[in-house]
Image: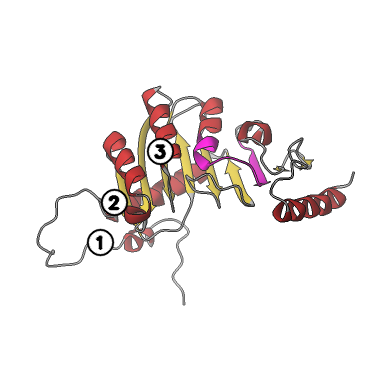
Amino acid sequence: MSQKASLREMLDTLEHGQRDRSSRAMDVTSIYQDDAGVIGRRHQKCLDVLGSIAPGQTKHVVSMGDWSCDNMVAWALGIVGPSDLSFTTWSISRAPASRLICMADDGHILDLYGVFDLRTAVTSAEAIRMMRARFGKVRLYDSHAKVYVLTGGLFPLTIISSGNFTNNPRVEATVICADPEIAEFHREWITTVWLAAEDPFAPTGPEPETPGPNPFDVLRGLPGWAEDE
């Protein structure tokens, strides 16, 4: 079957699944896959869709899979070994928080720091408390980015995805890149934002006399930053 025909079939099948959520027609195999990417069926599991990745490779994934981005982190750790995780994401729920904590307790995640959107202090308060209690280095910022970077293992991996640390089987698109320069780029700007972000459990006190740093003042100094004319 040609790639074009496979993509048409994928769209037809996804539409059918949206109309009939009880359908198991998409449970069997991936619809389309080659060296560059994969399109998964509804309810497929993370390991079945993602396969493997090698240094220097970039993989594109489209899925309606039954997983959260922490499952992709676990998949990646299974390939590159124990690593540090830095990330920014929009939301998290209790089950993914528990799984991330287990990965750290089992020695797979060596160090973790991350940035969540400000709204998670209300919408995901318990999960944020769990993450803060275990890892400490969890902060809040006005961020909608979903980027997960693993470094310190066999080789670095960067996961850029529309998905969060929540189990939400909708159509999601992900790019996974095994390139050290890409990983360093994303790790650096995430660190910059993290340093300027709000600690949700920091002691409260008088308002500072001057506003805190704007992380994008620092981002302007990174390679590739271009001011609008």
Discs 1, 2 touching: Cβ within 8 Å: yes
Q: Dot 1, how many residues are within 10 Å of its Cα: few (below 14), some (14-19), or many (20+)?
A: few
Callout 2 amino acid:
Leu
Scheme by which the image is coloured: secondary structure
Residue 209 forms part of the magenta stretch: no
Foreground residue among 23 and 33: 23
Which residue is tagged 1?
Answer: 213
Q: Report the residue marked by disc 2.
A: 195
Q: Which residues are magenta?
A: 56-73
Residue kind at label 1, given as amino acid type: Pro
Dot in front, 3 or 2: 3
Please give the name of the residue rendered at 14% of the width and 55% of the height, measured from the top-left corner: 204
Marking on residue 9: none
Where's the N terminus, which quadrant?
top right
Question: Label 3 to label 1, Cα distance in Å?
Answer: 29 Å
Above/below status of 162 relative to 58: below
